[in-house]
Amino acid sequence: MCGATEGGLSLDGVNVAKEALIQGQVLRDGEPVGNAYVRLLDRTGEFTAEVPTSATGHFRFFAGEGQWTLRTLAPKADPVDKQVHASIGSVAEVTVALV
């Protein structure tokens, strides 16, 4: 067993017991979106971080505990905001569907 989540990002080398992870995949019509950006906003809406999606549409943030907003930006799509709660010792898996 390689430690990867089903169809998702590998957790090899990540100590989930000491980290709060937010990760997921951006999809459009069920297909991965590799040219999107995902922003991490804190509970007040302030920008904290931004990562590009991989070729398979995946992204990952190491976040502090608490409530966060993921804002996904992609060509030819309206921005999509999703609320997510991060907790140390767990992985918050998020799927973002673009319209």
Image: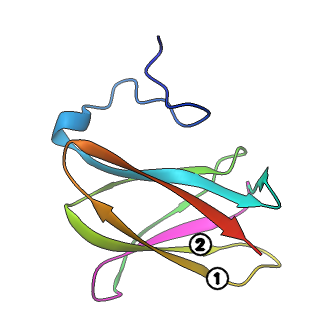
**Residue carrying label 1:** 79
Question: Mark 1 vs mark 2: which is more N-terminal?
Answer: 2
Q: Amino acid at mark 2?
A: Thr
* Residue 97 magenta: no
Q: Is residue 60 visible?
A: no
Q: Nearer the viewer, residue 48 or 24?
A: 24
* Part of the protein shown in magenta: 34-45
Question: Dot 2: within a 10 Å radius of its alpha carbon, few (fewer than 14), some, or many (20 or more) residues?
Answer: many
Q: Nearer the viewer, residue 91 or 34?
A: 91
Point out the image quarter for the C terminus: bottom right
Q: Nearer the viewer, residue 42 or 66?
A: 66
Q: Nearer the viewer, residue 63 or 93?
A: 93
Secondary structure under tag 2 reads strand
* Residue 44 magenta: yes
Q: Is residue 64 left or right of residue 36?
A: left
Task: Calculate the distance from the C-alpha at mark 1 to the C-alpha at mark 2.
Answer: 6 Å
Q: Indicate the position of residue 96 as horizontal and vertical percent values.
A: 61, 64
* Residue at 55% across, 67% down: 38
> Is residue 48 depicted above or below 60 in this figure?
below
Q: Is residue 11 left or right of residue 65?
A: right
**Residue carrying label 2:** 72
* Residue 75 found in image quarter: bottom right
Q: Amino acid at mark 1?
A: Pro
Residue 93 numbered tag: none
Dots 1 and 2: beta carbons under 8 Å?
Answer: yes
* Residue 66 found in image quarter: bottom left
